[in-house]
Amino acid sequence: MDQYAFTVSFVRKTRQHQWWCSDVTFHCADQELCEQWVRATNEQLSSLTNRPKSLLVYINPYGGKQRGERIYEQKVAPVFRRAGIFTDVIVTERANHARDHLKTEANLDKYDGVVCVGGDGMFSELLHGLVTRTQTDHDVDQNQSDAELVPCSLRIGIIPAGSTDCVCFATVGTNDPITSALHIVVGDSQPMDVCSVHQKDVFLRYSISLLGYGFYGDLQAESERKRWLGPARYDLSGIKTFLCHNLYEGSISFLPAGDNVGHPRDKQPCRSGCRVCQHSKDEHNEMSGEKEKPGDDSSRGWKTVQGEFIAINSASMSCACPRCPKGLSPFAHLADGTTDLILVRKCSRLDFFRHLLRHTNKQDQFDHSFVEVHRVRKFSFQPRRHELASPEEQSEHLKTTGFNPKISAQTSAVSSWSCDGEILHQAAIRVSVQHQLIRLFARGIEEQ
Ligand SMILES: CCCCCCCCCCCCC/C=C/[C@@H](O)[C@H](CO)NC(=O)CCCCCCCCCCCCCCC
Ligand SMILES: Nc1ncnc2c1ncn2[C@@H]1O[C@H](COP(=O)(O)OP(=O)(O)OP(=O)(O)O)[C@@H](O)[C@H]1O
Ligand SMILES: [Ca+2]
């Protein structure tokens, strides 16, 4: 009777964007029929060209709660094995190991994708390695801020095992290693914008989530000193930075995006198969003919704002993470060629607290007189260099304004940028959104 059988594994969607791998076994009395089914099923599967057959995996053994290797071995490797995916696995031995290996050594012809097991820092390593490698292979000079960058052909998979995992959360809707492994197995593809950051004509870094000056820059610098604390370092540094309430002067010039990509407050979230992102390709092609320089309001489109700021944030995607489920800019898009520039001007501690609190409830965090938000394609920032202030002037400033202007006789009041969780010590930067430069093994957040 039931002498012959074969088992098919399939994806089952459970709750909250989580996927699970289930099995169903078919029994059959006839050997020939059973083999026919297995052959036909395998033929169908091998005709799905989106599915990766071979992957290069980098594991950070020290990310997040240091569970990267275990998560991979126990949860991910079995899923890849069942899908018949070949893997080469590298457990990193130092910071930037994965980036450097991708940049120069890895034989990328062998693979259909690269995968990181770790947090946003580890993802950033793969992003830098892969983008730089692609430009080198095509003789593109990354130092030229107006160079047309070549999109990467390999997709990147993220198995979340870090402290924040914001890129994974904002592209999948959950931080679950098995769900991410299944998005890789079925060969999903999500294009993503990447911001390039330059100082004059020197390339500094790429960013895919948050570029933050002032509050997030200071918070990041503080949390680097507390790395030993693990994920809790962000909360403690957040409280400390909040209490310091530093204020920074400067001027921001930006090139607003056209109307076709919506507005940061239009309540149109980016979801799987997003129309805004799909249509943005056309507008992008129209725009790319114009090469305008920032800082000159006479060049069409550019705007400049000046003042004293608590925070200057550029969110290229929502930046949703478990700590902040709707994100820094809830209606930002993953692949529309723009970033949402959020300017938080001088305000009281209480008002800034109210603004932060609105990240965690239903109220609009942009609905404050001291907050403005613009959807932009490019921007540049120039900190205001202070004249050397005497100690008397400084204490006078503190008395009259209640702010610590962070001026010493020698230094100027500048913060640093947090770039996807890495510190950038240059304050004066130029940022340009590179439309759909990379692709992830993801499909965006699905409507529930
Ligand atoms: C009053 C409640 C306030 C809740 C405010 C929530 C706002 C949180 C916004 C989080 C946005 C994360 C964006 C992700 C950026 C990633 O590229 C980067 C790399 O992993 N992660 C971080 O920089 C990690 C950044 C981690 C930021 C933690 C912020 C904690 C703020 C705490 C403020 C406390 C005020 C307390 C007053 C007594
Ligand atoms: N073998 C290693 N030894 C030390 N550092 C490493 C190693 N491999 C990677 N790193 C570095 O560790 C840093 C943190 O890694 P990762 O992003 O995986 O975790 P995390 O910081 O806990 O998470 P998140 O970035 O989400 O906050 C990264 O900047 C990465 O460059
Ligand atoms: Ca975007």
Image: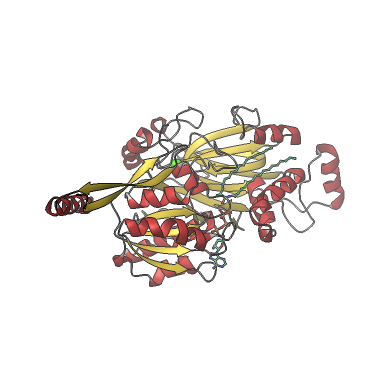
* Name of the residue lying farthest toward the front: 1
Q: Is residue 214 visible?
A: no
Whole-percent x and y of residue 100? 46, 69
Relative to 431, 436 lies left or right: left
Q: Is residue 52 visible?
A: yes
Whole-percent x and y of residue 244? 76, 46
Q: How is the image coloured?
A: secondary structure
* Name of the residue lying farthest toward the left: 32
Whole-percent x and y of residue 15? 46, 37
Q: Quadrant of ligand 1?
A: top right
Relative to 37, 93 lies left or right: right
Whole-percent x and y of residue 204? 52, 59
| Figure disc tally | 0
Query: Could you say which is closer to the camera, residue 239 or residue 302?
Result: 239
Query: Could you say which is closer to the camera, residue 12 or residue 230?
Result: 12
Query: Could you say which is closer to the camera, residue 116 or residue 181?
Result: 181
Q: Residue 279 is drawn in which quadrant?
A: top left
Relative to 246, 330 lies left or right: left
In the displayed structure, would residue 104 be above or below residue 214? Answer: below
**The C terminus lies in quadrant:** top left
Q: Residue 272 is drawn in which quadrant?
A: top left
